[in-house]
Amino acid sequence: AWLSILASLILLVFLSGAASAQVLAVLVGVFVIALLASVVEIQPETLMPAVRSSPLKRMRMSAEAREATDRAQRRGEYYLSDMTLMDIGLISSQASNEGMVMRKSRTISGDDDGVRPFITLQVDPKDADRNVMIRFEIIDHNGQRQYIHEMKTYLRDGEMNILADHHLPLISNMQIGQGGDWDLRVSVDSALAGILSFAVTPSLVQRDRQLSRRSRLEDFDIQEDDSPASLEELMRDQQSNRRNNTR
């Protein structure tokens, strides 16, 4: 009805001849825009993915979450329907005189007691009120899985902090070896949510052992350098000793 009224008014302006050609063109443009806005059906649910991936939401993500999400997307395995990975990382624990000290870090050491992975999810209301399976994996620099833990989690709308139930022991863990760059992989219902790299360093005891072993090898190399270079030199020395004894 309102389109009909608008069309009638624009027609009267045309018939009056009082408006210029530019004004008539503007009126026709306004009518076309009004017609499209009335005929085209806009479905809000089709706009939700664009809203979720808006730059504003990405700015709220931590640097670790953006890095982990980008790595998962490059793998071609990334998929989260109505959830956004806001943060991801590791919580290491170490006993001290003041009690248990816990810290978030991308560098863990063999001197720590243990480490637990965690994620923070932003859950939309329509994807809430259901159970999902969260899978944490820690993979060493050789591609071997050193930690696998799955936990069933009940999703609620809003921001959720999810910490693994079990930890990876670090102190006296011989699998750490010389350390290196490891990966943390997180999946939600078998869908890859993020991959984050982190650094692992040996404990002080392991580093002392490595230094001692290296020092022994260097001493052995020096002793080898002091020995005769060839069998010919050994024979020459033996003949010289015989001549000296004969005299």
Image (cartoon, helix red, strand yellow):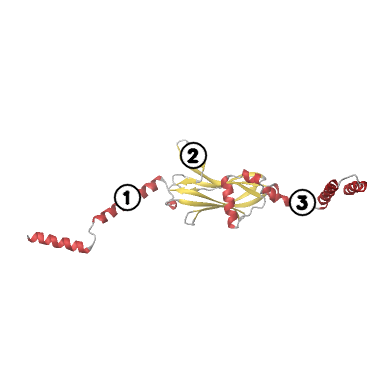
Q: Nearer the viewer, residue 162 or 215?
A: 215
Horizontal side of residue 43 vs 244, given as left or right: right
The residue labelled by disc 1 is 215
Amino acid at circle 1: Ser
Q: Earlier in the sequence, mark 2 or mark 3?
A: 3
Label 3 environment density (alpha carbons within 10 Å; few <14, some 14–19, many ≥20): few
The label nearer to you, 2 versus 1, is 1
Q: Nearer the viewer, residue 213 or 171?
A: 213
- Looking at the rendered structure, which numbered label has been put on residue 43? 3
- Residue ID at (19%, 61%): 234
Say if mark 2 contacts mark 3, CB within 8 Å: no
CA distance for labels 3 and 1:
72 Å
Task: Please state the horizontal and vertical placement of residue 189, each as a whole percent of the image.
Answer: 62, 54
Secondary structure under the numbered disc 1 in the rendered image:
helix
Q: Does the image show residue 243? A: yes
The number of numbered badges drawn on the structure is 3
Secondary structure under the numbered disc 3 in the rendered image:
loop
Amino acid at circle 2: Met
Q: Earlier in the sequence, mark 3 or mark 1?
A: 3
- Looking at the rendered structure, which numbered label has been put on residue 100? 2
- Residue ID at (48%, 48%): 199
Amino acid at circle 3: Gln
Task: Please state the horizontal and vertical placement of residue 10, each as a whole percent of the image.
Answer: 89, 47
Task: Please state the horizontal and vertical placement of residue 84, each as a whole percent of the image.
Answer: 64, 48
* Image quarter of residue 233: bottom left
Secondary structure under the numbered disc 2 in the rendered image:
strand
Q: Nearer the viewer, residue 81 or 64?
A: 64
